[in-house]
Image (spheres, rainbow, N blue to C red):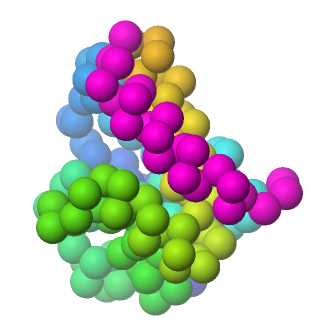
Amino acid sequence: MITIEEALRIALEAHEGQKDLDGNPVILHPMTVALAGRNRQEQTAGLLHDVVEDTDFTFDDLLQRGVEESIVDTLRLLTHSKDMTYEEYIKRIVTSGNDVAIHVKYNDLQHNLKRGRAGGHSIQVAKHEKALAIIEPHIKER
């Protein structure tokens, strides 16, 4: 089982040099998602949720770095593959019953909406608002 600090080191390495749409370091997003997590699993998955989707890291790389199988399984759900629409991807997370994935995606969407609205990214805002409407009813009390 890796620590939060180890997950942060992996995320920092994976996202090194990446910038978001507004020119900010990408690492700020997974850090924000992690800080919204309710427990170690959500915080770890929050830090790592974009690693496989947006970098050269693989799920096997994460397992070799000590990320436990349950977190990697959550990350598999949170990684949007190009063979499904974004709506299908959100519905897959919701129907999985994986509470950690559902809450991490909720936290991810909340932060993406905040960033999108602040940056005037209307296409992303519309996409994330639609996804939030799908996932929000499945959020358990915090």
Residues 142 and 31: in front is 142
The image shows residue 17 at horizontal and vertical percentages of 21, 35
Is 104 within the magenta? no
Is 141 within the magenta? yes
The image shows residue 80 at horizontal and vertical percentages of 29, 61
Q: Is 42 placed left or right of 142 in the picture?
A: left
Q: Residue furthest right?
A: 141
Question: Which residue is depicted at the point 57% across and 45% down?
Answer: 133
Question: Which residue is depicted at the point 53% across and 24% down?
Answer: 114
The prevailing secondary structure element of the residues shown in magenta is helix
Q: How many marks?
A: 0
Question: Which residue is depicted at the point 73% across and 64% down?
Answer: 39
The magenta-colored residue range is 120-142
Residues 104 and 31: in front is 104
State whether residue 1 is above or below residue 4: below
State whether residue 76 is above or below residue 42: below
The image shows residue 113 at horizontal and vertical percentages of 49, 29
State whether residue 103 is above or below residue 101: above
Q: Quadrant of the C terminus?
A: bottom right
Residue 10 appearing in the image: no
Q: Quadrant of residue 125?
A: top left
Q: Quadrant of the N terminus?
A: bottom right
Q: Quadrant of residue 24?
A: top left
The image shows residue 14 at horizontal and vertical percentages of 27, 54
Q: Residue furthest bottom?
A: 69
Question: Which residue is depicted at the point 35% across and 63% down?
Answer: 89
Residue 59 appearing in the image: yes
Q: Is 14 placed left or right of 98 in the picture?
A: left
Residues 58 and 91: in front is 91
